[in-house]
Amino acid sequence: MRLLVTGADGFVGRHLVRRLARDGHRIGAACRQGAAPMDWGGADVTVLPLELTDDRSVREAAEFGPDAVVHLAAVASNPEALADPGLAWTVNAAGTARLAEALVRQREKAGVEGRLLVVSSGEVYGAGAAAARRETDAVAPATPYAASKVGAELAGLEVWRRTGLPVIVTRSFTHTGPGQDGRFVLPSFAARLLEARATGARRVRTGNLAPVRDLLDVRDVVEAYVLLLRSGEPGEIYNVSRGEGVPVGELFRMLAELIGVRAEPEPDPALARRNDIPHLVGDSTKLRRATGWAPARTLQQTLRGLVDAEAD
């Protein structure tokens, strides 16, 4: 199969391209202009420039002629989206609309299916009861990032209803692993704890440790995407989640234990997120029933992989 991965140079994209390559697919890796060269491990990968704000760039990427697309490219962090909400909407929502329309045209021109997996976020559910969220729950985004992701979902599903382009949406909950950068909570914890071990510091700055999160390994998330490309139902939304909530403070403690450092967290208001969702856990029953997916890595294994990557 010919598969297109947008945002292939990003954290999840790099893992996904390598995973798809193991199945022998021909892959179009759509990356931002000026992205650093990637090591694809000898896979059959064609690197394509992609700028979601540029209609011509999107059309040219679609001309790769993919049988299916995993759409990861986005303004992907809350601080970045908060700094420029308009840009977040332009990239995440309008960019998804552009891509879906380009795939419709390519489908008509070349007869390829053009199945589109739109990767959204569990954050679209917003604050709510301390219970696992289901796909039927109302969305209540509380940040520009989450709101723009709702826009991306709507854009993709509208094209499915109007044209029949097979569009599937995932709402992926918190995930981490090797290669995630320090903008995100767990890699930043690991980096600070490793520094504390090296310097003998007894206190480590943190943001809010009270929120409860549902944490997956990026490699398990990637496996869910692969299975949804095969078995997902067009027009449907699937939570990608472990289904277990862990307080952020407990994740900090587990990382400290793995690193072997006795350091106390020191909450710093400058690191705390505004409008942080107190409890964000997903019910992935629908995904499991549709695909047979289940996480292959325990929480401990996921954190160990993150620590080992940070230490290298």
Image (spheres, grey):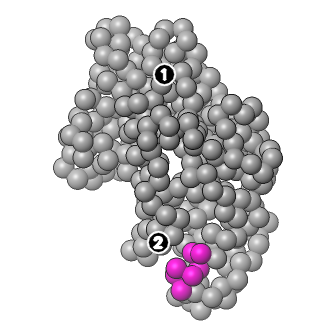
What is the number of the mark on residue 86? none
Q: Position of residue 73 (x, y in %)?
A: 48, 37
Residue at image position (53%, 15%) is 159
Dot 2 amino acid type:
Arg
Quadrant occupied by the C terminus = bottom left
Residue at image position (35%, 17%) is 113
Q: Residue furthest bottom?
A: 200
Q: Measure the C-alpha gap from mark 1 to mark 2.
A: 36 Å
Closer to the chain start, of discs 1 and 2, is 1
Of the pair 312 and 220, the residue shown nearer to us: 220
Crowding near the residue tagged with mark 1, few <14, some 14–19, many ≥20 C-alpha atoms within 10 Å? many
Instruction: Tell me where the magenta segment starts and ends, as one range.
Output: 254-260
Compared to residue 294, the image places residue 141 above or below, namely above
- Mark 2 lies on a secondary structure that is helix
What predominant SS class does the magenta segment belong to? helix
Of the pair 120 and 147, the residue shown nearer to us: 120
Q: Which residue is mark 2?
A: 304
Q: Position of residue 253 (x, y in %)?
A: 64, 76
Q: Which residue is mark 1?
A: 234
